[in-house]
Amino acid sequence: MNKFLTNQFGKGPNNSLYLSDRSNFAFRGKWIGVQYNTIMDKWHLGDFKSAHYQISVEYGSNEAETMQVSVIARPDRAVVNIYGRSSINQELINLSATVDASVVYLNVEPKSASYAGAKLIFHASYAQSINKLSPPAIVADTSTAPSSGINTFDSLDNTFDATNITFDKV
């Protein structure tokens, strides 16, 4: 088997992985049943900052779609970009991402109740985090409305407290 692997892979330019002629990657494996509030994938922000997905969804043998998805996150926000989406008849799923300060969740649900139970498989490429995980910078309220103020930040437990400070213009 080792000989087979060495015939298929090699070192490419820039430390890339070289595939011999006509070699491809294929994926299948355990599928996920798409229901409401289904978590497709999750990862820790301390390990990864972003991920790229190749997703394939099927509902029966005649309804299908495929898409490329990019997800990037920080402790208070995750962003999903769907591109290269192709569907037979119509789209089958909705995707969203949430983050709970340290774990990113890629959520999937059927586009309509009639597509509940669709089967989903995916392949992911993760980009490891470069910087140590830390909370995002705090932005002060710059509103000039008379009733607005600035909440104070408690550095002991890293939360905003209920104290409201206002400044008068002179």
Image: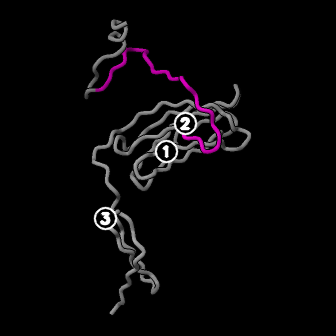
Helix, strand or loop at mark 1: strand
- Assess whether residue 33 is covered by the magenta stretch: yes
- Residue 135 vs 105, above or below: the answer is below
x and y, in percent, of residue 147 in the image: 46, 84
What amino acid is found at the position of numbered circle 2 in the picture? Met
- Residue 155 vs 1, above or below: the answer is below
Q: Say which label, 1 or 3, has the lower sequence index.
A: 1
In the figure, residue 112 lies in which quadrant? top right
Q: Residue 67 carries which label?
A: 2
Q: Which mark is residue 156?
A: 3
In the figure, residue 12 lies in which quadrant? top left
What is the CA distance from the residue labelled 1 to the residue labelled 3? 28 Å
What amino acid is found at the position of numbered circle 1 in the picture? Tyr
Helix, strand or loop at mark 2: strand
Q: Residue furthest bottom?
A: 170
Q: Give the range drawn in magenta.
A: 16-40
Q: Residue at x 59, y 32 (%)?
A: 32
Q: Residue at x 40, y 49 (%)?
A: 102
- Residue 158 vs 149, above or below: the answer is above
- Number of the front mark, 2 or 1: 1
Q: Say which label, 2 or 3, has the lower sequence index.
A: 2
Residue at mark 1:
105
- Assess whether residue 25 is covered by the magenta stretch: yes
x and y, in percent, of residue 59 in the image: 68, 31
x and y, in percent, of residue 21 in the image: 39, 14
What amino acid is found at the position of numbered circle 3 in the picture? Leu
